Image (cartoon, rainbow, N blue to C red):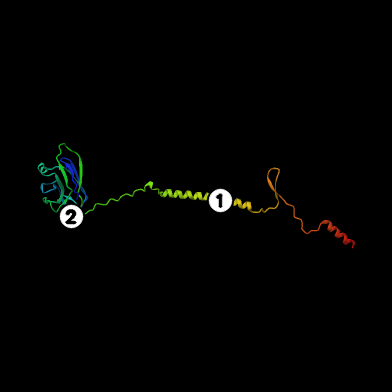
Amino acid sequence: MKTSFTTYYIGSTLTVDWSGWDSSILNRDMNGTSKADLWVNAWNTDFSTWSKKISTSTIDVSYSGTFVWKVAIDEEALSDTNEYGLTFKPTGESFAPSNPRLYSPGFYVKSNETTSTSTSATSFIPMSSTTPTSTPTSEAASSDTGALSTGAKVGTGVGVSVAGLVVLSALGFVLFQRRLRSSPQEMTGSRDQAPDGSSYIKPQPAPQELFAPPPEIESTTNTRREMM
């Protein structure tokens, strides 16, 4: 149960809510019954044993529910103590500050010199339940750490790939030009220029036979053969 006290004033409206208790709690603290009356009572019995039933009908505490109460404490009781609480007791039982019971956190009640219309709330805390641990939200990575986000890394990779393709294309073009310059021409002849400015291949004359005898030597040989 909570130990911190909230202050309410006479005449203010207090909304009480509860989430319901399971059978294990009801068996332990309510003698196995879920039918209950709601009471307001002095919190510290060393100063006061004052109590008052405020519900007008039976409440089934195995289900969640709410109860609206306009804060009212007898002046005599308030002069003895200003610490109070709310308690569920099995239906029909007289109040006693001991089990069977289900009780709320304590709160302060004070006289209010001016009329108050404020609405407050208090809750019964099921003793069998545990306060859920809040799950912290994951914090975004700090932008000043120098680490690239996933999107930035992908963009950088694409940029590097494109730059690599450009460099490879340029290198291939240079190598291709060098190969053209160094390879021998397949066509024979010399390159000349036509009157219209275009270039063409000028055919070379056919090579002479290397061992053909000169014409004058051949005619002399024939004359000798005739004389013989």
Q: Can you tell which mark lies on residue 182?
A: none
Judged left or right of residue 126, residue 171 is: right
Mark 1, residue position: 171
Mark earlier in primary sequence (2, 1)? 2
Indicate the amino acid at tag 1.
Leu
Q: Secondary structure at mark 1?
A: helix
Asked if one can make out residue 109 in the rendered structure from this viewpoint, the answer is: yes
Whole-percent x, y for residue 77 in the image: 10, 44
Graded by Cα atoms within 10 Å as few (under 14), some (14 to 19) or many (20 or more), the crowding at tag 1 reads few
Asked if one can make out residue 55 in the rendered structure from this viewpoint, the answer is: no
Q: Residue furthest front?
A: 145
Whole-percent x, y for residue 173 in the image: 57, 50
Q: Quadrant of the C terminus?
A: bottom right
Residue for point 84% across, 56% down? 216
Q: How many marks?
A: 2
Whole-percent x, y for residue 13 in the image: 18, 41
Which quadrant of the structure image shows residue 214? Answer: bottom right
Judged left or right of residue 28, residue 143 is: right
Establish if 98 lies above or below 114.
below
**Which numbered disc, 2 or 1, marks the residue closer to the eye?**
1
Q: Can you tell which mark lies on residue 26?
A: 2
Establish if 135 lies above or below 196.
below
